[in-house]
Image (spheres, rainbow, N blue to C red):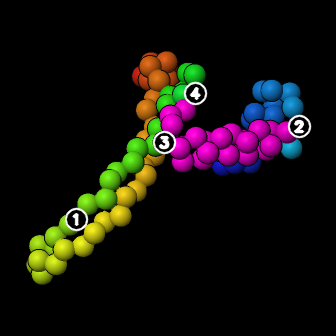
Amino acid sequence: MLHKELVDKLSKSLGRNKSDINKLLEALGNVVVERCSELDSITVPRLGTIEAVKHCEKVETHSDTGKRTLVPPRIEMQFTTSNVLKKRLNQS
């Protein structure tokens, strides 16, 4: 689903205009970025949990040359679906 389709569908189901929906989606995106940058998780009822996982830095050795390089730390986003969503998807 494209952003425009999502805005249209939410606008119709909530009875609000599209500019309000765009503001809500932008605010949601900002909250997700802010909380995940602090390595917090966000739970959306009936949908799932968005979680930021930090992987520590490590040293890797190239198998052919034997050269060692430092891989910097990184943050990975993980999404876990809720049981409600899993049940609904499996029923369809």
Question: Could you say which is closer to the camera, residue 84 or residue 12?
Answer: 84
Q: Look at the image and tell me whether residue 1 can be seen.
A: no
Mark nearer the N terminus (2 vs 4): 2
Instruction: Choose mark 4 or mark 3, whichever is in front.
Output: 3
- For label 2, the crowd category at 10 Å Cα-Cα, with few meaning under 14, some 14 to 19 and many 20 or more, is few
Please report contact status of discs 4 and 1: CB closer than 8 Å, yes or no.
no
Is tag 1's residue or tag 2's residue first in the polypeptide sequence? 2
What residue is pinned by disc 1?
Answer: 59
Q: Amino acid at mark 1?
A: Val
Question: Is the stretch drawn in magenta largely helix, strand or loop?
Answer: helix
Going 65% across and 41% down the picture, which residue do you hit?
31
Q: Which residue is mark 4?
A: 44
- Residue 42 seen anywhere in this rendered image of the structure: yes
Instruction: Decide which of tag 1 and tag 3 comes sooner along the chain.
Output: 3
Say whether residue 80 is magenta: no
In this rendering, position of residue 65 left or right of residue 43? left
Task: Compute the Cα span from label 1 to label 2.
Answer: 52 Å
Which three-letter amino acid code belongs to the residue tagged 2? Answer: Asn
Q: Which residue was labeled with disc 3?
A: 39
Residue at the spot 39% in from the left edge and 48% down from the top edge: 54
Q: In terms of sequence position, does the residue under pointer 4 or pointer 1 come before the other?
A: 4
Cα separation, mark 2 vs mark 3, equals: 33 Å
Q: Earlier in the sequence, mark 4 or mark 3?
A: 3
Residue in the foreground of this view, choosing between 79 and 37? 37
Region rendered in magenta:
20-42
Q: Position of residue 86 (x, y in %)?
A: 44, 23
Q: Which element type, helix, strand or loop, lies under badge 1?
A: strand
* Residue indicated by mark 2: 17
